[in-house]
Amino acid sequence: MTTRHRDHRRARPSAPARKSAPGSADAKRPKPTPPAPADAVAGRTPGGTLLISALEGSPAGMLIVDRSGRIALVNSRTEALFGYGRAELIGQPLEMLLQRRFREKHRERRAEFYDLPAARVMGEGRPVYALRKDGREFPVEIGLQIFETTEGRFALASVIDITRRSALEKKLANSERLADIGGMISVVAHEIRNPLGTIVMAAKAVGHKDLSPEEHQRVLSLLTLETDRLNRTLTDILQFAKPGEARMTPGDLNATVREVLDAVKADPSNAGRAEVREELAADLPEISFDADQIHQALWNVISNAFQALGDDGLIEVKTEVRDGAVVVHVRDDGHGIPQDQREKIFQPFFTTRAQGTGLGLPTSRRIVQAHGGDIRVESSPDRGSLFSIFLPIGGAAAVTGS
């Protein structure tokens, strides 16, 4: 064959692709399916096959979700947890696995999470409930982590069923509550029995006709004193047991501090016992708080400072802004709190005084924490104690103790 013929043959255009006639074998042959999302994620991720193998071996439910919130990959544990087959989950919005009351908030947080990625856990401190295919809900803890691919960010979610853990926590909480109730019964019995006994004896004495006017007046004073004591005990218990929902309104915390100081100093039991110095910041910002509850919390802390002094001493009350919070400092120069008692002082019914329920400081901490704040304590033997009440400014995040 000559070169000319070979070149001629090489230059011939190729025949157009043959179309399959309807009903032919070629027409019936299935078209290749696009890669599954899992394969796509694996292809975009370094070590993708290894990643899928690792997820399959995890004891937790594992899901990979794209930025739009659609599920790209699940492991077999996820199928077992939720009761769906893998094909029913791939491509669906993640929110289908959450109770309806959590879905809208989750969409908002998901968008924020992709914009500001950081490893985090959902379900710590507040319950999150997932939804099975059969409509049953169950408590979960969800870990989230962003990872990068050649086509953008994906989120890796680990889902742990905490049903058993929640049940154990409730059981433990019930046990602790029963222990608190036992402590309360003991304190109530002691604190009520004593004044009741005095009241009964005084009431019997009032009926004696041979009492002099002075003795009669002394018995009536005793009745009033013990009745007031009994009322204070019951008030402490009720305030601790049910402090009530905080009614938050904007206000001047300095004004509330002044009111409490005036009331505590006017209390006959505190009269002349201490020098009180005030240093209230003039530029303190307005914050939202329940004035009645914070009044009670401050009363307890400042009264505690008076009781720590003995017969005389110095109490300093200062306000300032620190770490995104308005802070009230109450310092006394009493004997201080021993190291082994510093955590106990916030435990219900713990008291080192002959009289008292041990509920003042626990009530104060409960009130302050309900406001998103915290109470911190510093103390040194023979140098006194410093109680600092932190209340967040505006929409600041909750203040946590260091």
Image: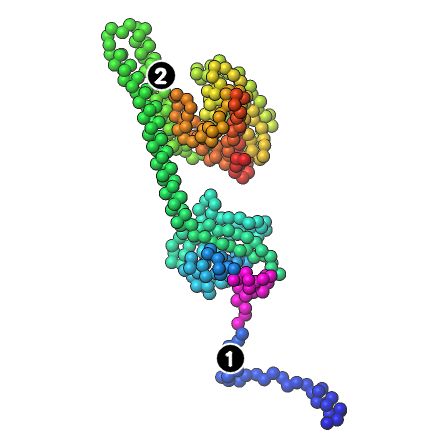
For the residue pair 315 and 337, the one nearer the viewer reads as 337
Q: What stretch is highlighted in magenta?
A: 33-53
Say whether residue 129 is visible.
Answer: no
Residue 32, image quadrant: bottom right
**Is 35 inside the magenta-drawn segment?**
yes
Q: Is residue 183 left or right of residue 276?
A: left
Q: Which residue is drawn at 38% across and 45% down?
A: 168
Q: Quadrant of the C terminus?
A: top right
**Magenta segment main secondary structure:** helix
How far from the left and from the top, in percent, is residue 200? Answer: 27, 17
User: For numbered disc 2, what is the local secondary structure?
Assistant: helix
Q: Which amino acid does label 2 sit on?
A: Leu
User: For numbered disc 1, what is the local secondary structure?
Assistant: loop
Q: Distance between the residues labelled 2 and 1?
A: 99 Å
How far from the left and from the top, in percent, is residue 300? Answer: 45, 25
Q: Quadrant of the N terminus?
A: bottom right
Residue 321, image quadrant: top right
The residue that disc 1 covers is 29
The residue that disc 2 covers is 225
**Is 90 inside the magenta-drawn segment?**
no
- Say if 30 sits above or below 162 in the image: below
How far from the left and from the top, in percent, is residue 298? Answer: 48, 26
Q: Which residue is drawn at 48% across and 26% down?
A: 338
Residue 20, image quadrant: bottom right
Direction bottom: furthest residue = 1
